[in-house]
Image: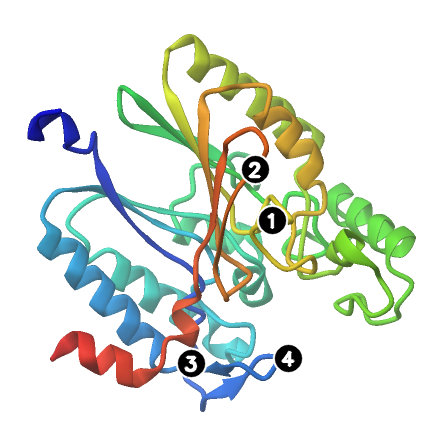
Amino acid sequence: MGSAARQPLFSFGVIADVQYADIPDGRSFLGVPRYYRNSILVLQRAVETWNQHGNLKFVINMGDIVDGFCPKDQSLAATKKLVREFEKFNGPVYHMIGNHCLYNLPREELLPLLKIPGRDGNAYYDFSPTPEYRIVVLDCYDISALGWPQDHPNTIAALKILEEKNPNSEKNSPAGLEDVERRFVKYNGGVGEKQLQWLDSVLQDATNSNQRVIVCGHVPMSPGVASKAALLWNFDEVMNIIHKYDSVKVCLSGHDHKGGYFVDSHGVHHRSLEAALECPPAWTMRWSS
């Protein structure tokens, strides 16, 4: 095979879980160090690297750009600050929402800031960087106790699921839940019926157009790629639709922080990206030297 045949159709940049906040460093519930102020430097280095590459079609942010511990009177300013850093990339930037985004701002404020082209507060969409490929961005907090008004049907549906599936008074705790049932915690979410129908129609259209598809969502979609407590509530329904079509080649996610890679029984590659938040400052300095 000649060198021309090995050239990629396109390249793109990805980053996940920046979770910036102007607060001292801390640790996760599992004790993993988190570098809240340093994470914006990780993003800046990423943007520099993407621009130096010179031939990236786009960049996609896998969600959670500001941390839930960010003081709420700083949420709006911090989100705008991070968006400005992304806009220094010389090309299109696509965002999706994560749970930490929704700890900071309601959907009605968040979606315009992130230029997410959803309707009626929805944050799922698709685009084609080249005629051969379709990128599908899921709204993994469609059914969620986060981000919607308290009386919204999606909030009510989410609280019902949590009440039925999680007996703990603290709904962010998976204590006592076994295996994939551990996913029924408040910091995860689900994909609603309307979005499932949309996903099916988009994948059908991509298949008819002979396009290959990359599906992106903040929350992992396979137990093989992430911890059981960091999975989409209805990952099985989503994957049943995805597996109907040979066109889907990759599922990308963030959320789980430690990162992971898994090829499922249908040959779909799942990649959970490591969190920028947990990149040690020494590494950031090394990149810049």
**Residue 38 lies in what quarter of the image?**
bottom left
The disc, 4 or 2, on the residue closer to the chain's N-terminal end is: 4
Q: Position of residue 229 (x, y in %)?
A: 69, 60
Q: What amino acid does circle 4 point to?
A: Phe
Q: Residue at x 54, y 59 (%)?
A: 255
The secondary element bearing badge 2 is classed as loop
Task: Judge left or right: residue 231 versus residue 64.
Answer: right
Scheme by which the image is coloured: rainbow
Find residue 36 and name its label: 3
C-alpha span from label 2 to label 1: 8 Å
Q: Tell me which residue sits at (83%, 59%) in the image.
A: 178
Tag 1 residue: 224
Eyeballing the image, is 39 above or below 203? below
Quadrant containing the C terminus in the rendered view: bottom left
Please name which of the two marks, 4 or 2, marks the residue nearer to the observer.
2
Which of label 4 and label 1 is nearer to you? Answer: 1
Q: Which residue is mark 2?
A: 264
Q: What is the quadrant of residue 92 in the picture?
A: top left
Q: Amino acid at mark 3?
A: Tyr
Residue ID for mark 4: 29
Give the Cα distance between marks 3 and 4: 15 Å
The one of 194 and 261 positioned closer to us in this rendering? 261
Label 4, label 2: how many angstroms apart (C-alpha)? 29 Å
* Corner quadrant of residue 105: bottom right
